[in-house]
Amino acid sequence: FQFKIKDATFRNSQAKKHNSRDIPPTGYGGGIFLTGTGDYDVDSDQIDLSGMKSDSNSADSGGQSTYIVMPQLEEFCQKDSGALVKGDYDDKESDLNDVEGISTDVASFNQLNPQEIKEEQKPLHYYWAVFASLRTAKVVVDFRNVDEPFKYQLFGINMIEGTNEFIWPPLDGTSDPIVVEDVPGSDQIATFSMKDKQFLNYKQKQYGALISNDRRFFTGIDGIEGNVVQLEVEVIFDSEGGGEDPGKETEQEQEQIIEEQQQQDSPQKSKFPWWIGFLIGLVVVAVIITIGSCLFCYCCIWKKMKKEKDLDIRLKQLKDDFEIIKQTHKSYL
């Protein structure tokens, strides 16, 4: 039995999930869903997907292009650094969910519900990726060196020479290579230098370091993603100064760096012309006076109307009293 793809394109293929049932699982592998019974001998090279190309494939449950169910999945993906699985998958550009799978046999897979599969499956890229592991990270600060005042050293293993670049600043995308040296009987040492003083504020902040061989997975302690190594800082003071306080110049420069960085981090105060404030004040005063005048006039008019109303009431009362007296007088006549 052999399954080898030398040159084939899978385009606009879809793997749809069944709407009414979860078992057996459906919706996996937009281009190819690969599985089988029994154990697979990885060294037999009977399966080779290296000639597979994918274009606009989709899957509802996992593996937009390829999904593999196999007990020996890890060994199969690691052979030839994933060449038998990748097809046209690009380690830096492709989506991680393009090629996915789960390490189990097909009988067990068919009994799993979607949540169980989701917890166990993973992008196949994880199997062939080389995860660097950091033990320590250190920066030496030496302002006597004008060209390279910051020298960084990363100590660890599985760091691949030629794949690492230090990018700073991130906005312009300029990059410099990281030099990786193998130390016999010890860790690897990766070194690079920086000149930008604004990056490091070691007196007020702590920094952590991660490393990646492919710009996809950034690892630290024990090769675990996101498990940062705290950056150690060593400051070299200049003891040559004819009796001057050692490190005085370095301390002053560091204080200046911190002050400049704080000024950049804090929001800039806008300069507001005084005459604009004066005009605004005049307008506010005028508005207050106008409102006060209106209220005063209203009060005066209200009082006047109230007096007139009271006078009308008294006149009416007098008229009514006069009528009563008049009627009483007639009754006596």
Image (cartoon, helix red, strand yellow):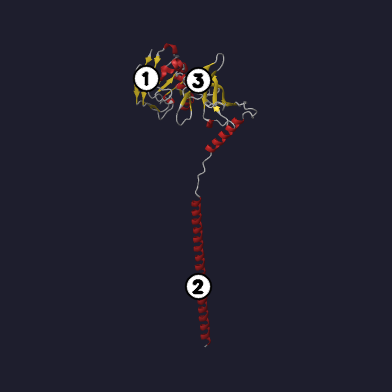
Judged left or right of residue 219, residue 33 is left
| CA separation in Å, label 3 and label 1 | 35 Å
- The CA span between labels 2 and 3 is 100 Å
Q: Nearer the viewer, mark 3 or mark 1?
A: 3
Q: Amino acid at mark 3?
A: Val
Badge number at residue 52: 1
Q: Secondary structure at mark 2?
A: helix
Residue 324 drawn at (x, y percent): 52, 81
Identify the residue at the far front of this view. Answer: 242
- Disc 3 target residue: 179
Furthest-bottom residue in this view: 333
- Image quadrant holding the N terminus, namely top left
Q: Residue furthest top?
A: 44
User: Along the polypeptide, which appears first: circle 3 or circle 1?
Assistant: 1
Foreground of the two, 209 or 153: 153
Element at label 1 = strand
Relative to 294, residue 74 above or below: above
| First reached walking from the N terminus: tag 2 or tag 3 | 3
Vertical relation: 262 (above or below) 121: below
- Mark 1–mark 2 Cα distance, whole angstroms, equals 101 Å
Which residue appears farthest toward the right when viewing the image? 243
